[in-house]
Image (tube, helix red, strand yellow):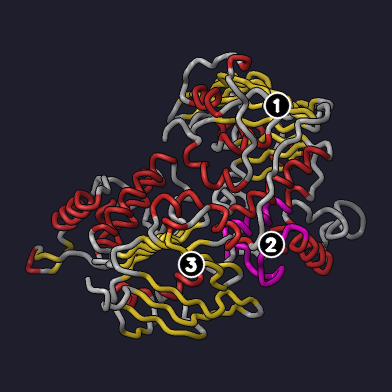
Amino acid sequence: MTSSAPPAVRLTGIGKRFGAVVANDGVDLVLRRGTVHAVMGENGAGKSTLMSMLFGLLTPDAGTIEIDGSPVRFDGPLDAIAAGLGMVHQHFRLFDSMSVADNVVYGAEPRGRGLLGRTVIDRRAADARVRELSARYGLETDPSAIVGTLSAGARQRVEILKALHRDARILILDEPTAVLTPSEVDSLFAVIRRAADSGSTVVLVTHKIHEVLSVSDEVTVLRDGRVTGRFATAEATSAALVHAMTGREIDEVRNPGTGTPGDVVLEVSGATVGDARHGIVVDDVSLTVRAGEIVGIAGVSGNGQHELVAAVLGTVPLASGSVRLLGEEVSDWHVRDRRARGLAVIPEDRRGEGSAVTLSVAENLTLGHHRTPPIGAAHGPRRGWMSIRAERARARDLIADYDVRTSGELQPIGALSGGNAQKVVIARELSHGAPLLIAEQPTQGVDVGAIESIHGRLLDYRAGGGAVLLVSHEISELLALADRILVMYSGAVVAEFPGSAATTTLIGAAMAGAAAAAPDAATEPAPPLDPVQLSIDREHESPLT
């Protein structure tokens, strides 16, 4: 490659507007061949919109796109694919009932001759193509595996193989690590580096500083649809990237450790949950959460934390044990009745469980409030009626209070970025004023600014006398917020630490199944971790890395 060769991609003056919202405003971006270029910014900064225009999913209102020095206009993704682009979306677009090979070659199937000379899909050639690409890029995948049975990391490898099968020279990865384990993240980074070293151009769309500093060569930062920073990664610092993303310094948010917990709000005794496929998934777990207290649950994904939350919420039954809420036995109660008793929940799956993606922001903020004044009434002549005016006014207030980046309360929540959708869920649940909040992975897939905001909201809830059960894979998050930390391994609670005595080493050892040392054996408590450090180090907090 000579210095006079044009870049793989050049975007000049790209603009895109959705109604009154300016998603991109005069964006310039240059992607060089054989490099990893990170496009970063907070949720709603315009990253995904920009990439959607590059891939032909959206049409720019202004500006030009050049590929290899030649202007192009894409009328759809097929045009972009033909020009050598491939895109792996944040939410996978696969057929769960089909095999890996069928998904990879779908729409570009190798053909052969069948009976009576008919043209048919050559499945042997499809399998061979998957194996060849897997070996070349280190994407270990079984061509015959059914996609619906695969882990998130394996599904992502299938998405990448789809793009590579179509000879993509420019690969766009949109928030690729949002649902991956730390070990899967490391494997993905190795694939990204291998692809760039072989001459491909990789665009990494992310808000995670650690990812940018670990694998990229160059960085472009967006804020409110505009470019606010361009860096060679080798010369970038986390502080400079954060300032370019947010326009400010990020303050430390940490549990002050003050105050005396009040009465028991949640009491779980001997909870056991069975699963037809995996046997016992929650094994005789007992815990309490008091008013004005955050109790954290640590553990590697798949060790029973999610099932324990489901048992408390009432979406799965207990095989044995009990759940008491505000002193009352609720084990046989319906989910609706438990929530009415005083339970709010931020679920792990904000799209599948936490929101109705086709409904508006206002409607999502109303879920659970539709019988409550001023929107509705549970009794009297207005029972069964809702005030749309009150619903929308309340939504506008919450949107402003929680800084939800949206074009308005009528925008479908499915059109929001992940972090803004999470803010909607959190605004709805905290506005209940419920005495108990269950927060499961509340900052998963959100940016550094949103982490700061969410942590602050949880601590304010605690300070107001709320009881919080916080489930997180991130040790640093638990150290920053929890008054007490329980560790789950193989469905059981294997250790408990006061927040003041907990360390990454102690918690990590218990998460890996090692015998927990006594809290007073710790050398030094972990230092305070602010949201910037959480964003940088979160992949390093698991004992699996």
**Is mark 2 in CB contact (under 8 Å) with mark 1?**
no
Location of mark 3 (residue): 230
**How far apart are labels 1 and 3 at the CA level?**
53 Å
> Does residue 506 lie above or below 540 as drawn?
above
Report the residue at 92% width, 59% height from top. Answer: 381
Q: Is residue 407 magenta?
A: yes
Front: mark 1 or 3: 3
* Residue 404 numbered tag: 2
Q: Answer with mark 3 or mark 2, whichever residue precedes in sequence.
A: 3
Report the residue at 52% width, 46% height from top. Answer: 536
**Residue type at tag 3:** Arg
**Which stretch is magenta?**
401-427
Report the residue at 9% width, 65% height from top. Answer: 113
Which residue lies most toward the right here?
A: 380
Front: mark 3 or 2: 3
Percent x, y of residue 400:
76, 63
Q: Secondary structure at mark 3?
A: strand
Disc tally is: 3
Location of mark 1 (residue): 323
How would you rate the neighbour count of disc 2 (Cα within 10 Å): few for under 14, some for 14-19, many for 20 or more?
many
Corner quadrant of residue 94: bottom left
